[in-house]
Each structure stands twice: as C-alpha cells, then as structure tokens.
Amino acid sequence: MSHWQTFLDSPDTRGPSLGVREQWHAGRRHFVVWALPVSTPSVVRRVDRVQQALAEHLSPVPLDQLHITVWVAGFLDGDGTRNDDLSFETWAAIQRQIQAWQEPIPVRITGASSFPSCPFLQVEAIGSGLDLLRQTIQSIHPNELRFSDFVPHLTIGSYIRSQATAPLAQILGQHRALPPIPLSLLPAEARVDAHTGTLSWV
C-alpha cells in the first residue's frame, strides 16, 4: 500500500505529544543525520506553495533547511549509555567518507504526499547512487535509528495538532500531479539542535 493511500485511510493526523521531545533528547542537544541539502529554486518554490496551502495546519521546515535525509545517526554529545548515542570515532569515520564523496546523487522531486505526522514531496532515486551512499554509511554504523523502512522524501513541515485527515488530503491532492524536477545532490552532515529543532550544516 502506498504512503498516500495509508494517509487517506487514516482518520486523523498525528500531532506532537507533550513532553516527547524532552524525553527523547534527555538533555542532549547535538543530533546528527547525513542528508542531501536541497536549495534548487524550482524545488524551493514548490515547497513554499504547499507550505502556504497548509499554513494553518503546519509547522513548516525553513526553506533554507530543506533536505533529503539519507542516514539517521544519533546524539554526538551523549555519554555512550543510550542506543542513540553516536561515538566520536564512528562520526569521524563516516564524515571522512562523506567529505570524500564526489559523485552527485541523482534524484527526482515529484508531487506531495504525507505520513501521519508530516507532509512531504516524493523523491524518486535515479540509479543506485542513493543506495550505495547508504550502504557506505551502514558499513561503518550498522544500526541506523529508524523505526520503519527507508523512504526518500523531502519533508515540508510537521502537523501542529492531531486533526481530521480528509481536509488535508484535499489540499495536498491539488499538489500531487506535478512534473518531476531532476536534481544531482552531494551529501553533507546536518546537525539538529534537539531542543529547538533547528538544523545547521556542518
């Protein structure tokens, strides 16, 4: 079943829960992911249009922080006692591979879809570049922090509350049949401030 159909079949979206962020970061701050930064104007405009259409329902991703997540790693400032703590040695080994990566990853950005918690633009991988990049990171850091299968996507924002799915699906449906935008992207480390959600590139 497609993610869109799953969204349509769900009666409600999933908004944030009180205290979940604090329980997750447990005082830690520097959460590391590796991603493909996206700044192509045509994609930024597409995201902006969907964000505006969903404005009253959405906490939008800042347009200068758009990205396609490749690998979710963990907290770099933990004490090593939790399964989502990332050791400095592992981080450094992956970062060396990322900095040496010279072959752009080809993808296509298409229309809107949604998970229960967030709308996104669909991403289609072209060739094996994205899989190869994930395999390279996995050879160093086998246990990615992931609770479902990897689905490449470009997050538009997160829903600010739990609410009926149907009106949101009607809005998103107007942004689904869009022509693909081909991109060639290089990976980078994204450092997320777990207290504020702000993303910065390293």
Image (cartoon, grey):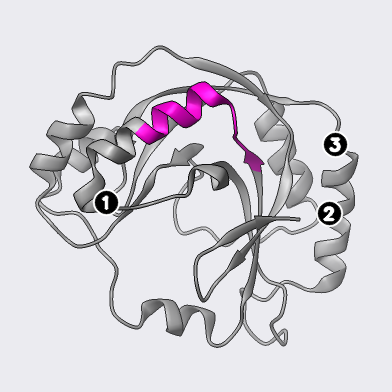
Q: Position of residue 184 (x, y in %)?
A: 68, 22
Image quadrant occupied by the N terminus? top left
Q: Position of residue 159 (x, y in %)?
A: 27, 55
Q: Residue at x 12, y 56 (%)?
A: 163
Q: Are marks 3 and 1 in contact (CB under 8 Å)?
A: no
Q: Nearer the viewer, residue 11 or 136?
A: 11
According to the picture, the residue beneath numbered tag 2 turns out to be 95
Q: In the rendered view, would you say 23 is above or below 52?
A: below
What residue span does the magenta drawing correspond to?
36-48
Magenta residue check for 42: yes
Where disc 2 sits, the SS reads helix
Q: Position of residue 125 (x, y in %)?
A: 57, 25
State the predominant SS element of the stretch in magenta: helix
Q: Is residue 81 left or right of residue 90?
A: left
| Mark 1 neighbour class, 10 Å CA radius: few under 14, some 14 to 19, many 20 or more | many
Report which quarter residue 64 is drawn in. top right
| Mark 3 neighbour class, 10 Å CA radius: few under 14, some 14 to 19, many 20 or more | some
Query: Which of marks 1 and 2 precedes in the sequence?
Result: 2
Q: Nearer the viewer, residue 41 or 173?
A: 41
Residue type, label 2? Gln
Q: Nearer the viewer, residue 65 or 111?
A: 65
Residue type, label 3? Trp
Q: Residue at x 20, y 51 (%)?
A: 56
According to the picture, the residue beneath numbered tag 3 turns out to be 101
Where disc 3 sits, the SS reads loop
On residue 97, which mark appears?
A: none
Query: Which of marks 3 and 2 precedes in the sequence?
Result: 2
